Amino acid sequence: MEAIKRLPVGISDFKTLQRSHKYFVDKTKYLPLLEEISNFLFLIRPRRFGKSLFLSMVADYFDCANKDIESEYKGTWIESHPLESKGKFQILQFDFSQVLDKIENLEDDFNTYCCSCLNQFIQKYQDYYTPDTVEWALAATTSKDKINILAKEAKERGYHLYLIIDEYDNFTNTVLNELGKDTYHNMTHSSGFYRSAFKIFKPNFERILFMGVSPITLNDLTSGFNIATNISLHPWFNMMLGFSEEEVHQMISYYISVGLIKTSDSANENIDEEERVNKIIAEMKPWYDNYCFSEDRYNIDPSMYNSNMVLYYLNNLITTGKAPKEMADPSCRTDYAKLKNLVRLDRLDGDRKGVLMKIAEKGYIDAPIADSFAAEEVMNPDRFVSLLYYYGMLTIGGTDLDALHLVIPNNTIRKLYYDFLVEQYQSLHGLDLNDLSAMYRKAAQEGEWQPLFKYLSSSYWKDSSIRDSIQGERNIQGYFNAYLHLSKLFIAHPEIEANHGYCDFFLLADTKKYPTLRHSYIIELKYLNSKATVEEVKIIKEQALKQLKKYITDSNIQSLSVGTQLHGIYLIFQQGKTTEIGEI
């Protein structure tokens, strides 16, 4: 009987994954596509999408020193579609996230790391070179000299060299954030050591493939010469990293078939395998899915799941028998820190914070995606939107003439936006979050909703610094969005479709995790200017009541909220005050 393939949690080395018999989502069909595009390639994807494992797989397949290619790729797509270039290259691998030791010794640390990798390369392939070349290369004290010595003999003997760089921009982004633009500029421009390193790569390697999370460093490195073809938005590679829903389905089915995932659901009722798989996917999908990396493949290819987030969920399900209480992977806090770093120079009304607040309030923004831009351009709101896309904070959700419709991909990322907004609001006028939590509990368990919505409404108007910076219906929605997402007792859906309309908020009691909850809420916000008459207020109230009645009878809303009492709540705001709060 074949041993169970365990989840590849935390594994980024292909050889280790195969030798330890871990589950592998086969992406080998992309190897010939990489060859077809160009010999020098560059790809940007957000963190936790499997870049490191993919690069390790590429290195393993083309490595002339790998004697286990046949066994390691047994059962994969590439086994039955072998490439002529299989096992033909000497592979030099860098992972630039390993570079920094001390921030003040940048060039020395970079050279030390590169020399260490090159020494490993020399020892691995020493039988291919003359003893003199090996001796000279090992004795050389700079990575540039080592590469020149090795490349000279490799060309003379007809050897094929392949350079693979993971996290190409990791330490440069750290430098940019911690030491500022001057130090970063000195590294990446003119005769800067990092730019000089990349200039020597292309003439000495037959193939280059490198990946990162941002196009900024690439732009600054390549100004004036072309290093590689950027395939980040190319339609062929839209599904290369991350998991499709079919791949997630297959993985869940496998773990059900080997008994690691039970066929009983959260109510301990036995259901058939397909229904169990679909229920698990339905729970994961709003949190981990919905990424698209090529506008040409939108609505053609299926959307992609963040692979590490899927593994986080399944690992919890397998080891504890239930979904994680915190659906957002805790490692996303790194992204939250990065988000704060990007806007730390702005005040609440600064350009970049303004962009974030607009996205958080609306859930989308229409803008083009720049394939590269300089560090100095990040202050430009349009470039900042592109950076949010590359970081995975936005994804392609359609087109709008010459711009792309960029949307918040899922609840995990939405939570990051709202956490950011809450922090900004709390710094201006802090709500008592303990009191707020108690109000959420009352609303969820006992249906006492008045204290919650009255507290949020009065707090909004109480502080002029918040009120002055977020006027208008959309901005009030952003404020409520941020605070309504704080409670773990509810799943907060902003602008969910219901009976051919969109309600402002749907607070769905999370009865899967908290079975004692009994109340869910549809919420409609209305905003009038200060000159609105009593009659206009009456008309807008009637409009809100009509909409709520329509939303509450929607079959999808009814299905989602089964087992709870569904309340329809309206809040009418007039500039400077809350006019009325009520229930239909």
Image (cartoon, rainbow, N blue to C red):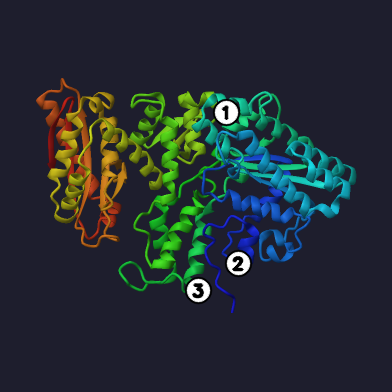
Is label 3 in a helix, a strand or a loop? loop
Pick the residue in front: 385 or 14.
14
Which residue is rendered at x = 56% and y = 51% of the image?
50
Which residue is rendered at x = 70% and y = 56% of the image?
60
Which image quadrant is residue 517 in?
Answer: bottom left
Q: Earlier in the sequence, mark 3 or mark 1?
A: 1
User: Crowdedness of circle 2 by 10 Å Cα count: few (<14), some, many (20+)?
Assistant: few
Q: Earlier in the sequence, mark 1 or mark 2?
A: 2
Tell me if 532 is positioned left or right of 135 in this view: left
Mark 2 residue type:
Ser
Please, is residue 516 above or below residue 501 in the view?
below
Pick the residue in front: 288 or 137.
137
Q: Position of residue 156 (x, y in %)?
A: 89, 43
User: Crowdedness of circle 1 by 10 Å Cα count: few (<14), some, many (20+)?
Assistant: many
Tell me if 244 is positioned left or right of 82 in this view: left
Q: Which quadrant is home to the C terminus?
A: top left
Pick the residue in front: 565 or 161.
161
Please, is residue 162 above or below residue 514 in the view?
above
Please name the residue that numbered disc 3 is placed on: 258
Residue 144 in sight here: yes
Mark 2 or 3: the one toward you: 2
Residues at marks 3 and 1, CA–CA distance in whole angstroms: 51 Å
Which image quadrant is residue 172 in?
Answer: top right
User: Is there CB contact under 8 Å for labels 3 and 1?
Assistant: no
Q: Earlier in the sequence, mark 2 or mark 3?
A: 2
Q: Position of residue 13 (x, y in %)?
A: 62, 56
Tell me if 70 is positioned left or right of 469 in this view: right
Residues at marks 1 and 2, CA–CA distance in whole angstroms: 41 Å
Mark 3 residue type:
Val
Please name the residue that numbered disc 1 is placed on: 184
